[in-house]
Image (cartoon, rainbow, N blue to C red):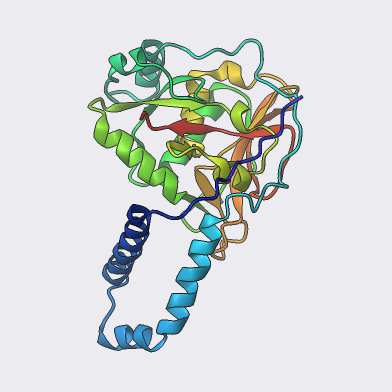
């Protein structure tokens, strides 16, 4: 049975460096909002007139983000594990497979796999930059799901519901993938990652809450590519299924992204769907990647 994980919190005063970083993040966010929104003079005056509301919103968000254990009750014991057939393949083998699936996709820097794995990672996985696969992230996800469907029995419970109004990348994942992409020279990214074991039995938002500082959630595109190169990971009912905490899903396409996609194996086929981020299930574990430190 799994040992329940509880994040430890140390009581110590905030440092001046931490204060400066938080203030800088807030200032950067305000400048980005002005630029993205295209704020004009009347709009800016409206914001200034509601300065107290803006301040309260910032206070509420900082309070929310600082509470590391607010979803501690969203965990359950789990004994589910990976199928015996599964083991991480070499970077070369994965890159060759991806070259077959995405002709002209490029190469990976195989020397990256010579480094020790970060804590929590189960292997090195080769992933295309989604921008090389399709014009938008949503189209890239659809293409990967189509490739899975062409190679084995597959069912998509969210067929026709994967547009930007329903599916988007989590902000943390976007930043971490951008850092990996900047640091690596190859057209294919080499990502230290794990297929769900580290967070089995946890809800998606609990997993996000206890991520290590260099850890981030994997989305449907990355995890779908990992399944393409490692089909042995999904082969039977009695195994650990996978949540995609690197994506957010809006069940009603109403701006409320309260779900996350995931993969499982039922009835002799791979299935893709979405679950509530608050749902803790012993069958599931959140897949995650790591930025080498």
Q: Position of residue 120 (x, y in %)?
A: 52, 26
Q: Is residue 265 above or below residue 204?
A: above
Q: Position of residue 141 (x, y in %)?
A: 46, 40
Q: Position of residue 219 (x, y in %)?
A: 49, 39
In the rendered structure, the answer to whether residue 92 lies left or right of residue 69 reads left
Looking at the picture, tell me which residue is in the foreground, 159 or 217. 217
Q: Is residue 54 above or below residue 94?
A: below
* Quadrant containing the N terminus in the rendered view: top right
Q: Can you tell which quarter of the image residue 115 is in?
A: top left
Residue at 62 percent of width and 33 percent of height:
199
Looking at the picture, tell me which residue is in the foreground, 273 or 117. 117
In the rendered structure, the answer to whether residue 101 lies left or right of residue 205 reads left
- Residue at the far left: name it: 185
In the rendered structure, the answer to whether residue 213 lies left or right of residue 251 reads left
Q: Position of residue 18 (x, y in %)?
A: 37, 54
Looking at the picture, tell me which residue is in the foreground, 28 or 86. 28
Residue at 25 percent of width and 25 percent of height:
186
Residue at 60 percent of width and 48 percent of height:
205
Numbered label tally: 0
């Amino acid at each position: 049975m799994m040992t329940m994980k509880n994040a430890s919190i140390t009581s110590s005063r905030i440092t001046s460096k931490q204060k400066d970083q938080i203030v800088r993040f807030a200032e950067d966010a305000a400048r980005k909002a002005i630029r993205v929104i295209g704020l004009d003079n009347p709009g800016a005056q409206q914001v200034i007139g509601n300065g107290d509301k803006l301040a309260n919103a910032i206070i509420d968000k900082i309070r929310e983000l600082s509470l590391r254990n607010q979803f501690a009750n969203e965990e359950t014991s789990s004994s589910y594990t990976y199928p015996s057939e599964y083991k991480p393949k070499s970077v070369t083998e994965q890159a060759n497979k991806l070259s077959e699936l995405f002709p002209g996709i490029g190469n990976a820097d195989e020397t990256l796999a010579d480094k020790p794995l970060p804590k929590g990672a189960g292997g090195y996985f080769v992933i295309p930059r989604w921008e090389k696969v399709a014009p938008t992230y949503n189209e890239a996800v659809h293409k990967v799901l189509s490739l899975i469907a062409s190679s084995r029995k597959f069912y998509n419970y969210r067929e026709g519901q994967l547009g930007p109004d329903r599916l988007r990348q989590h902000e943390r994942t976007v930043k971490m993938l951008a850092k990996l992409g900047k640091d690596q020279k190859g057209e294919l990214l080499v990502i230290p990652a794990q297929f769900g074991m580290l967070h089995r039995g946890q809800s998606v938002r609990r997993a996000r809450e206890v991520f290590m500082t260099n850890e981030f959630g994997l989305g449907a595109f990355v995890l779908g590519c990992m399944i393409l190169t490692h089909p042995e990971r999904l082969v039977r009912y009695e195994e650990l299924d996978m949540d995609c905490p690197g994506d957010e899903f809006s069940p009603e396409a109403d701006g409320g992204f309260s779900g996350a996609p995931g993969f499982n194996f039922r009835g002799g086929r791979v299935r893709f769907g979405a679950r509530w981020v608050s749902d803790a299930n012993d069958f599931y574990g959140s897949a995650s990647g790591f930025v080498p430190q």
